[in-house]
Image (cartoon, helix red, strand yellow):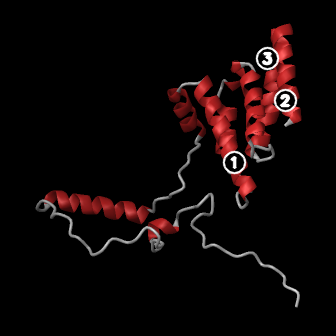
Amino acid sequence: MVVLKLVSLVLGATREANRDRWRKLSRQVIDTLLPFISKLQVNLDSEESLSAVEEVINGVCASVYRPVDCVLKALFTSPCELETTLGVERWVGGVVLLLRALITHSTSELILARLEELGLSMDYVHTDSTTDTTTTTTATTTATASPPAPPQHQGPQRPASLPLPITEASASFRDPLNVTQPETLPQVAMAR
C-alpha cells in the first residue's frame, strides 16, 4: 500500500513537471499493475488499499486506457485463487476498480465491440447441440399444430434452500467461484 501511495505521488509530480514523461510513466505503471491485479497479487482487501490503487488508476494519463484491451484482458482473466476469502476479496476489489476505469475512460459501445473482437465473454453456461435441435423441432411442431395449452401446475414449489437436481444443462455449468460445490470440512489432524 505504501508503494502504491508513492507511485501515486510520483505520477502527480511528473504530471506537473513533464507531460510526455508522465504519459510514458503512466503506461509503464498500468502495464505493470494490471497483471498483478488480474493475478490477485495486489492487496485489495481493505478500504485503504482500494483507495491507494484507485489513486494510481486515477493519476495515470487517460490515453493508457486506449485501446481498452489491456483492461478487458485483466478483467476477464480467470483467477485461480478463489478458494479463500482473501482471494475472493482481492478478485472483487480488482473487478470494481477495473470496471470503474472502463466506465470512466470509454463508452459502452466501444467496450462491447472490443469484447466481441477479442472473443472475451462471461458465458459460463454452455448449451448442448442436442438441446438446441430439440427446441427448434418442438417450435416448428408447435407452429403447425394447434395453439399451445396453458401451463399446468406441477405440484408444490421447491423451497429455495433445497439444491436443484443436476440436469444436462446444469451439468455443463462451470462454477468460477465454486459456490455450487458441496461444502467440505477441513481435514484436521487430531492427536489422541
Closer to the eye: label 3 or 1: 1
Expressed as whole percent of the image width and height from the top left, the position of residue 35 reads 77, 40
Identify which amino acid the numbered label 2 is placed on. Lys
Residue holding disc 2: 5
| Quarter in which the C terminus is drawn | bottom right
Question: Is the residue 50 above or below the residue 173 in the image?
Answer: above
Q: Is mark 2 on a helix, strand or loop?
A: helix
The disc, 2 or 1, on the residue closer to the chain's N-terminal end is 2
Identified at 88% across, 87% down, the residue is: 191
Residue holding disc 3: 23
Inter-mark Cα distance, 2 to 1: 21 Å
Q: In which quarter of the image is residue 150?
A: bottom left
Q: In the shown orientation, is residue 18 left or right of residue 37?
A: right
Inter-mark Cα distance, 3 to 1: 28 Å
Expressed as whole percent of the image width and height from the top left, the position of residue 188 reads 80, 79
Q: Is mark 3 on a helix, strand or loop?
A: helix
